[in-house]
Amino acid sequence: MVKTFLEIVIAPDFDEEALEVLKTKKNLRVIKCTTPPQDEIEVVSVDGGILIQDVDKKLYEELKVVTKTAPTDDEMENLVFGMKVAKFVKSNAIVAIKDKMAKGIAGGQVNRIWSTVQALDRAKDGVVLASDGFFPFRDCVEEANKCNIKAIIQPGGSVRDKESIEACEEYGIAMVITGTRHFKH
């Protein structure tokens, strides 16, 4: 914790032990937020109008391993954490996670491969990948393999899911499908 740079920590509650640790961080703001927003819709301003969409509340439908190689327990924890981060990043979101920390976040790109390359460039290797949208092609898996990625989580649902799953099988990468697509405008 001493080496981790933090400016703000927001949580529903803090126990005394956690507060004592957090007090050791200079200029850290600790905020207790007990009531999360209950909005059902999200309004986004766009050029020439507004976009109204349902709030993305569900993280995943199910966690289904679709490769012969399954993620380790640690990798699965990091994959789920990565999906929690990815759902709040502008699409096409790719998040590289290690030790429940975002090591590379890329979003807002025209295509998923550009986001994948950017996130991996920041993170290097030893991470897992989370994507807010499906991987219809093997290109992102190939980029992941170049960086020794061992697990990927994505919504699935593309008519070409088989292509990326086969690439994962070829490289020994675990792939988990959530059944829930996140798309943040």
Image (cartoon, grey):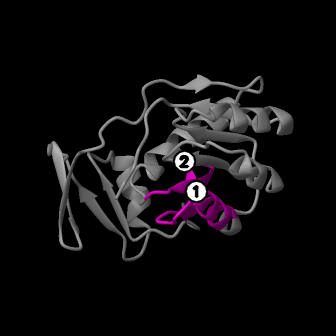
Residue underneath mark 2: 131
Residue at screen point 65% across, 41% down = 152
Residue at screen point 39% across, 54% down = 88
Residue at screen point 39% across, 71% down = 7
Picture quarter with the C terminus: bottom left
Residue 164: horizontal and vertical position, in percent?
70, 38
Rate crowding at label 2 as few (under 14), some (14 to 19) or many (20 or more) other CA atoms within 10 Å. many
Amino acid type of the residue that numbered disc 2 sits on in the rendered structure: Ser
| Residue 49 appears in the picture as rendered | yes
Q: Quadrant of residue 32?
A: bottom left
Q: Earlier in the sequence, mark 2 or mark 1?
A: 1
Q: Nearer the viewer, residue 2 or 60?
A: 60
Residue 44: horizontal and vertical position, in percent?
22, 62
Q: Is residue 21 magenta?
A: no
> In the drawing, what numbered circle is on residue 112?
1
Q: Nearer the viewer, residue 136 or 88?
A: 136
Element class at badge 2: strand
Residue 179: horizontal and vertical position, in percent?
47, 29
| Residue 35 appears in the picture as rendered | no
Q: Are marks 2 and 1 in contact (CB under 8 Å)?
A: yes
Amino acid type of the residue that numbered disc 1 sits on in the rendered structure: Arg
- Give the residues drawn in magenta, as a range: 91-120
Residue 113: horizontal and vertical position, in percent?
64, 58
Q: How many marks?
A: 2
